[in-house]
Structures are given as structure tokens and as C-alpha cells.
Image: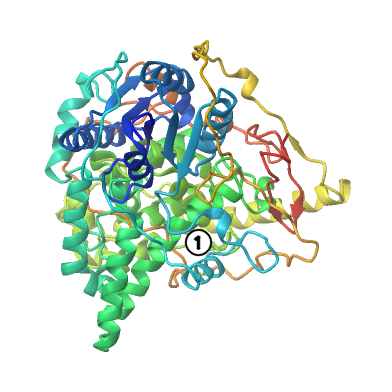
Amino acid sequence: MDSNRTIVWFRRDLRIEDNPALAAAARDGSVFPLYIWCPKEEGQFYSGRVSRWWLKQSLSHLGQSLKSLGAELVLIKTQSTLAALLECINVVKATKVVFNHLYDPVSLVRDHSIKEKLLELGISVQSYNGDLLYEPWEIYDERGNAFTTFDAYWDKCLHMQTEPVSVLPPWRLVPAAGTVEKCSVEELGLENESEKSSNALLGRGWSPGWSNADKVLTEFVDQHLLHYSKNRHKVGGNATSLLSPYLHFGELSVRKVFHCVRMKQILWTKEANLEGKDSVVLFLRAMGLREYSRYLCFNFPFTHERSLLSSLKYFPWHADLGNFKAWRQGRTGYPLVDAGMRELWATGWIHNRIRVIVSSFAVKFLLLPWRWGMKYFWDTLLDADLESDILGWQYISGSLPDGHELERLDNPEIQGSKFDPEGEYVRHWLPELARMPTEWIHHPWDAPVTVLKAAGIELGLNYPKPMIDLDLARERLTQAIFKMWEMEAAARATNSSETNEVVIDNSDCIQTSAIQRVATREKTPCPTISSNDQRVPSFQIGKNSPPCRKRPKDVEEERPYQNEMPDHNKKAGNARADEDLCSTAESSAAKKQSTSNISFSVPQSCSSSEVKPSQEYESFELKRPWLAQIDMEQSSGKEGK
């Protein structure tokens, strides 16, 4: 046992408790805990300012915990994750590398490539499920196809025969001998000097770290879960679970959350507590949506670039940078939308309901490409989570079979009256409207001149007029939908068979550092397949699969949401603002050198002023057959080769 030396590669699993990779390494022998920060490989998904602040605090917390168990967390900043791993393997003379799975498209490709190369060099590699209740490849319908609607997927999960099982944390770690060139958490460069004053305010509202996550979970389950069904839509309060950033960084085990909530469900069912039972069902559904976001990204790894429904590729998005800037800065003229965007800019967090409202406005009112909004959320949210981000924006833009109808246009005025009836949230984030009477707070453009004058408001001067009228927005959206249908019909008429679509691999364009050679040694058994092993996306399409096409419905002003994006948390302290209310985000490339508070670049694939409906995006060397209107991905493993 002493001869076994295992590298535990931490990523978004920054906890001691219920960490399968860490527990397995501790059982086998000595361990070498490692975290690798490689900004170059993050690409356009380089983390935003507030997200990097959280990561920095979480790494410090994890390092202290590991040290108390007997092993030191080694931090490495590098240009190549593989090269850093190989250096550590050489120094430690490691016989094994273990890690927990990630499911976003970028990580899937990187992890599979690294695992293959390590196995070729005789290094045993094992990966585990540390992020989900069930692995994406464990949940399929009776035909063996991936689910494309949430209700069917979640129903299958809830009726699985096997219950998710947690693993006990190690009580002691034996450190593996070896010294590598490491750095401190400060030297990782997660936070520069210009950001520290703003980030200091975040600590007033948030306490990163896995042990703090346990406290937040306990408080929520004991004090707030019972009334979750009643309070979860209060946009100005802290009625949500407060768990999303902890779950994103893996500071909290999703299995532990599930078991805690299920115990309450059993208790309240026995007591016939209807409110409690309803609250548990809704909260578990929110957890299910997080699971589903990983499920979609694994089975359809193109969803960060293209809509799941193929017809959306013909939608004539209005890629207007001026409108995009006004939306980002909270200058749309619709108070609830503006309040949400200013809170996001100031704190890095907004309530889930506000996320739905502001994203719907961007897509449906302004016809902005949903990928722009997805990237902006990624750059600015404290709990930025790519898989949840993809699910939320695809849902809002009508890109999912069970998402918002594309033609649905929700009125921000009605939503304001429903979710902020007293206008307290708007007044807090839009001080220029602080004296506006509640009757007019969500539609000041309709207020009499005397009311506006008494409130000190001059529309177009100290608060903008609505940038687009509701009726005009509805007309433009309808025209865009008809245009989409026309282009889709023309494409089908021109080419009735679209089965030969090929996406070209763009990996040749990525510069990589020279890979260090590993000292040869006797090869150890290297299992490539096990019950824990990470799989690559693989989808077999049944010939009799039912089509998943959404039927057009009448435009609705307001109705209950059938599916919502996963619940998120509380607001943090205010970050410092500048006079122009510009974004904390900026282009991913520029972020690698420095961070600015005043610039933002749209995703590279959407940066032109005219979006070509038929444009395809390069990601995977895969062939993509079509199932009804849904793009399906073939395997990037055996089939892809």
C-alpha cells in the first residue's frame, strides 16, 4: 500500500466531505493533492471577476482543510494542464491519477484527451462521479435514447432503482513525497490589485468554503425549506437556497443536499404537512434542473454554440451592439429589467426570477443572440455555471422542446406588478425612481406629468424612455419567427436530406506547449473501463424515435412557468460603481492580461453585426445525424475516431 502514490486532481470539487476521488486515493496509499490553474485553456470561458474571487477563497479554505489532515494542496499555474500533470507524476513517482467528472463541452474534450495520453504512458487513471446524483449515461428512455424534455428525464431519475450513495471523508491523509515548483493562491493571479476593493465587499454577503457550505445548507433546510414554495419568487429577499455557488465549485455534495431534503420530505409526509411537501417537490425539481443541465451538455455537447432545436439556426437575430450595451447597463427604460441588470453588475448575483425576466427581454424584445446573453452571464455571475447557463438561455430562447415558446412575449410591467408589487426592489437598484408612486413604478412612461415632476423624473434625461414599445417588439418578434419558418422551408426544399453535416475539428488552431517526457517505469495495470469511469458523449438514434417538435401557440402575456432555471442565491454586497454603469466583464482574451471594468466583447462566433442563420460552429470532429428537429451528437470516442 505504501508504494501507491496517487495524484488527486481537484477541479470543481473543492471539498473534503463526500469526495469520491479523494476518498479513493486516501484508501490506496499516499496522496498528492493538486489544483492546476491554466487560463490559456479556459478560452472564451475564462472566469469573470467575482467567480475568480470565489475560487480564490475556496482554494484557501480547501488548502487549510487538507493541511489539517496531513497533506498540502499544491497549486500550479501553467500553460498546459497535461504538462503540469506529467511534471507532478515525474517528481512524485505517482502510480495513479484520480479526479471527479466534469460535463461541460470544454472539460469533456480536455479530460478525455488527458486520460488517453496518461494511459498511453502507463499511468493508471480513474475518475468518479462527484457532482451528480446519476451519471448522464445512466439515464435513457426505453429505446436507449437521451431524453430531450426535463419532466421525462426527472421522472426517470426519481424512479431509479438505486439510490445515490455518499462516501465517508478521510480522517487522515498520508502525503506523497516530492517537490514541484508551486505557487501561493495569490500567485495564481485570480485577483489583481484593481479588483480587490470591489471584491472586498463580496465577503460581507458570502462565505466561500466547503465547511461554510454545510452551514448554509443546514440553515436553509431547518429554517427556509418549509416555506420555499411560498417565498421562492420574492425577488428582493433571500428566500432561495443560497447554495448555487457552493454547488458549482463542488464545495457541497449534491448527494448530501438530496438526502437532507428527502429526510424532511419523509417527515412532512408523515405529518401531512402539505406546504412542506410542496416545498420539497419544488426544491428537488430545482436540483433536477441542475442535473438536467449536465445531462444536456454531455449528450448534446454542441449546446453552448447552437440551439438544441435545429430550426433556431434560421432565426434572424438582431445583433445590435448598441442594444446589447443598453441592456447590460440597465438602460432599457423598463424598471424591473434595469434594476436586475444593475444588481447583476454591482453584486454578481440576481434572483432566479430576475434572471428569467432580463434574459427573456434580451432575446424576445431586442432579438439579441442568446449566446451573447449566455456569455455575459458567465462573465458576471458569482455562481456562473456553464451548464446551467446553457440550459437557462436555451430554455428562454425557445431552443428546447419544453422551453418557452419562441413567440411568447412577457410584459415587464405585468411581471413587475407580480414579483415586485410594492416596487421595493426597483427603488433599491434604481434610486432615480425612489420617489415614484407604487402605482406607476413599473411603467413610469404612463404616469401623468405632475406625478413625474413630483418624483423628480425627466424621462429621457435622468431615466430613459422605453427603448422599444411592447407592440413593436411583438410585431418584430412575429416577423422574425415567420422569417425563420420561411428560411427553414427553403432550406428543406433545397436539400431534403441533411444527414451529411460535418463539423470540422478546430484543435489544430490551438497552440500547445511542449509536453514533458515521463521517466519510463514498469507499467502498472491501467483500467480503461470501470463502473466509475468517465465516458464520452455517445448517442444511438432509434429509427422509431418520436419527433420532438413544439407546436406554435398563441402569444401569452403572462402564465405560470412550467420549467425554470435552477434556483440561485442571495445578493452580495455592493461592488463599486462607475458613472457609466459599465460591465465588470470584458473580452476573454483581454482578461488573461488584465481585468477592466468598462469593456465587454461578445462571443467570437456572434461578433459580427449580421448573424448568418446557416452559420455553423467548429467544435467536435463528429457527424451529426438529425432526429426530427433535434440535433443529435454521435460519439466523440470510438465513433468520432
Tell me what residue is drawn at x 55 percent, y 29 percent. 607
Image coordinates of residue 387 in percent, x first then y, are 47, 47
Image coordinates of residue 246 in percent, x first then y, are 28, 48
Image coordinates of residue 453 in percent, x first then y, are 18, 53
Specify the amino acid type for callout 1.
Leu
Image coordinates of residue 161 in percent, x first then y, are 50, 71
Q: Quadrant of the N terminus?
A: top left
For residue 450, say whether it is visible. Answer: no
Q: Where is mark 1, residue-wise?
A: 409
Relative to residue 122, is residue 309 depicted above or below? below
Tell me what residue is drawn at x 38 percent, y 33 percent. 9
Relative to residue 310, is residue 85 depicted above or below? above
**Count of numbered tags:** 1
Report the coloring of the rendering: rainbow
- Dividing the picture into quadrants, the one containing residue 5 is top left
Q: Who is closer to the viewer here, 32 or 285?
A: 32
Left or right: 139 with respect to 43? right
Left or right: 100 with respect to 514? left
Tell me what residue is drawn at x 52 percent, y 10 percent. 514
Q: Quadrant of the C terminus?
A: top right
For residue 504, say whether it is visible. Answer: yes
Q: Who is closer to the viewer here, 475 or 194?
A: 194
User: Which residue is most to the bottom?
Assistant: 272
User: Which residue is most to the left?
Assistant: 204
- Dividing the picture into quadrants, the one containing residue 439 is bottom left
Relative to residue 423, is residue 79 depicted above or below? above
| Helix, strand or loop at mark 1 | loop
Left or right: 394 with respect to 73? right
